[in-house]
DNA sequence: AATGAATGAGTCTTCATTCAT
DNA sequence: CATGAATGAAGACTCATTCAT
């Protein structure tokens, strides 16, 4: 399913270098922002020369694309979560929430590097939106729609409800970036809190 | 009630100029991002010279602060919403949601200008966080806590639940910036959707 | 002898304003240097508006010319010193030295404002040189030449010797500007020291 | 004897580039003055790009510091002159005068670049004063004091006398910068003239 | 005659990108 | 492939000067 497993020694070396540079870039971008980060800093953080960066990436912008691509590879929503699809609705939500929270936590550096720039650059809007928002939104819409029809979820405006949930993740990421303390220390409890908030709201009234 | 009504002719002229420049800056920042926006563009958008900008603001950074300050002035959460405090819980939430959605819509340009930069500049983190997140969060926490004690809201982890709700607003703003279509066209219906999602989740089970 | 004694009330007012502005300019130039001094600062120091400066002077450069002119007016070498011309040679030198040292002390602000800029701007070179160096040099040359012929001064290379003496004054001004402490506190004794040095020489009196 | 001989190829290349840029800067500063000189001009004069300048110097100000440092390196007062210390007093003075005059002539561009700015910038005052004035002054004071005690020099106010001599050099540099013609053409004769003036004095030999 | 807001040309400085070694 | 010095375009900011009030 993954497109190109690097097989040859050469390909593996190249992939490793790219990863090394992307990691450094993500770290520096996250810390100082895309524009305040200089290629010099990134080179130093990656422990290579500035010139080397340009042997692997076309431009500074391309580094950002690289981070997004890397981030997308880490997205394994499908496999892990698909298994929970058949679970009880509530359990599925908890699983999904946990999955997203973990994902945000792991990828925070990269998301923090990418998100602000994405919000600002129309050319990146759709790339990011498609890659990270729409795919999940579509999936969720299908799921919710199906469960509504099965009577497991109260009838709601599906697209908007899904946006609200999606938005919550994005917003929690932003609050995290802004350094919100309760969120920081309570992060691990969020899946349950969200499940209670969202799911009990979605579930049909007891005794209905 | 407003602290300093500019009274003299001179003060009014200065305030007008500042507003004129801030509006232009917000527009340009929103469109191209803080760093890609040039002072020349802002000057042109404001129909003044570059030099004039610096007669009213210390630096480009200061323009951003100016936008935040302006945004904060538009915050009138208290007055309008306080009246709804005694309403039925559900009605209050709808009122609040509507209020926030309107606010986001009106201030989108400015928020779009400010938010990405705020996420990226540690010095701005706390300023923005205190001004736009924490104040509302604190208010909501108090409200929710009180209503829990009155039995109008199910016992929940108050701080985290409030973060989830706050996050939703922030996240919806981000999705809006990213150009999400369903959100765009369904924006006016969001208050009800959110109320259903969030409130019915908070309300104690019927017959409980 | 002075060209235009301002007689009418109007002329006196104008002259007063010019003096007020020139004083301020000299102070600010002396403190921060011509280029680092802004017209705004000068205006503030003169307690007028920036615009007013331009009602009395054509440009910032013109202010410098104004200071030089003012400085030249203070030069009254002739009158006071001419009386000493017939004195004993040694007494004349002491009188002259004292006169120059006083002059430097009084006009330091203005000289400090003017000299560095004069050294740097070829257009000002000759103006300053003619006004403040050559006139005195010529006078001294004539005096020394005459006294040599009278046997009161040892035969020397007159032009170069006079340059050396002139240079001493200029150089002492520079050292003063640089903040040399012994010079500062011993300034009043300099005339005698210089007279001993220049007139008697360092070598012990023969047969003394 | 010089502290750090650049040994590696890299160090030599860097030192050469710095020298190349400093020379250009000194030329341009001397001609137009520090503030009227643009980095663009300096770059052109040094035959490098503007950016390259900043690879070797932190700022335009730093170029001035660089010139001063370079100038200080050329100061070899000690070695060459120390040998003359034991000479006849008159011969020592001639040697010193010749040394200083040569030094001024060689370093005129750099001095002309540095001196006016030094007079104007309090931060540079002491740096220059210590480096170029005080060191020599102290040396001279010691010498004169010793010779007075040996009876080779008439008892005088040592610090002030030394200032007068120091001032003469500085002043002659200034007159040279101002384009004084007799000085220009007679420069090579100045050491003898100065020696006669300072050491013998103007007064005719008693009993001569 | 005085004011001071508006102007915009001019400058230092940064930094992504290139390329000779 | 790696390097890092060189490049120069671009941009924030300053400030002498003007002019409407």
Image (spheres, coloured by chain):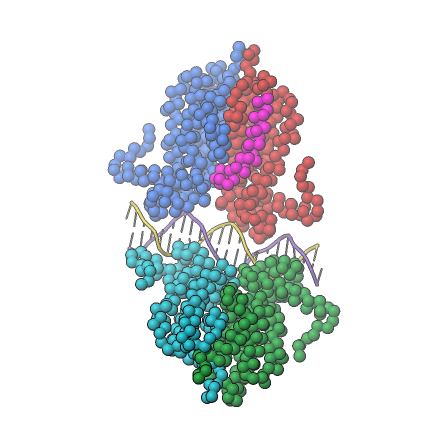
Chain colours: A blue, B red, C green, D cyan, E purple, F yellow
Query: Is residue D8 visible to the viewer in this orientation of the structure?
Result: yes
Q: Is residue B124 magenta?
A: yes
Above or below, D46 against B207 in this view is below
Task: Name, please, the residue furthest toward the right.
Answer: C9
From this viewpoint, is residue C145 visible? Answer: no
Residue at 58%, 61% in the rendered image: C28
Q: Which residues are magenta?
A: B118-146
Seen at 47% across and 38% down, the residue is A116
**D45 sits left or right of C50 in the view:** left
Instruction: Give the main secondary structure of the magenta stretch.
Output: helix
Q: Is residue C74 above or below residue A62?
A: below
Residue drawn at the location 63% of the way across and 28% of the way down: B81
Residue at the spot 56% in from the left edge and 42% down from the top edge: B65
Q: Position of residue C67 (x, y in %)?
A: 60, 68
Compared to residue B78, the image places residue D109 above or below, namely below
Total count of labels: 0
| Quarter of the image that includes the C terminus of chain C | bottom left
Residue C201: x and y in percent read: 47, 79
Across and down, in percent, residue D83 comes to: 34, 72
Q: Nearer the viewer, residue D60 or D102?
A: D102
Nearer to us in this view, C120 or B177: C120
Q: Position of residue D193 (x, y in %)?
A: 44, 80
Q: Quadrant of the N terminus of chain C?
A: bottom right
**Along the line of sight, the residue nearer the viewer: C30 or D35:** C30
Residue situated furthest left in the rendering: A9
Q: Does the magenta-highlighted stretch encompass residue B101? A: no
> In the shown orientation, is residue B87 left or right of residue A199?
right
């Amino acid at each position: 399913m993954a497109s190109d497993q690097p097989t040859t020694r050469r390909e593996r070396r190249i992939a490793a270098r790219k990863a090394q540079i992307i990691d450094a870039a993500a770290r520096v971008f996250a810390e100082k922002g895309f524009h305040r980060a200089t290629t010099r800093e990134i080179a130093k953080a990656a422990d290579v020369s500035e010139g080397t960066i340009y042997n692997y990436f076309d431009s500074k912008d391309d580094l950002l694309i690289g981070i997004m691509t890397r981030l997308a590879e880490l997205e394994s929503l499908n496999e892990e979560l698909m298994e929970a699809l058949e679970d009880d609705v509530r359990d599925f939500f908890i699983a999904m929430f946990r999955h997203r929270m973990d994902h945000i936590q792991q990828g925070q550096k990269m998301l923090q590097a990418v998100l602000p720039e994405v919000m600002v650059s129309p050319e990146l809007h759709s790339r990011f939106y498609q890659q990270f928002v729409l795919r999940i939104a579509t999936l969720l819409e299908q799921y919710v729609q199906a469960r509504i029809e099965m009577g497991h979820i109260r009838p709601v405006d599906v697209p908007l409800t899904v946006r609200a949930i999606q938005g919550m993740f994005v917003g929690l990421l932003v609050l995290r970036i802004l350094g919100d303390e309760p969120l920081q220390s309570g992060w691990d409890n969020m899946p349950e809190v969200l499940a209670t908030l969202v799911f009990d709201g979605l579930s049909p009234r007891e005794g209905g």
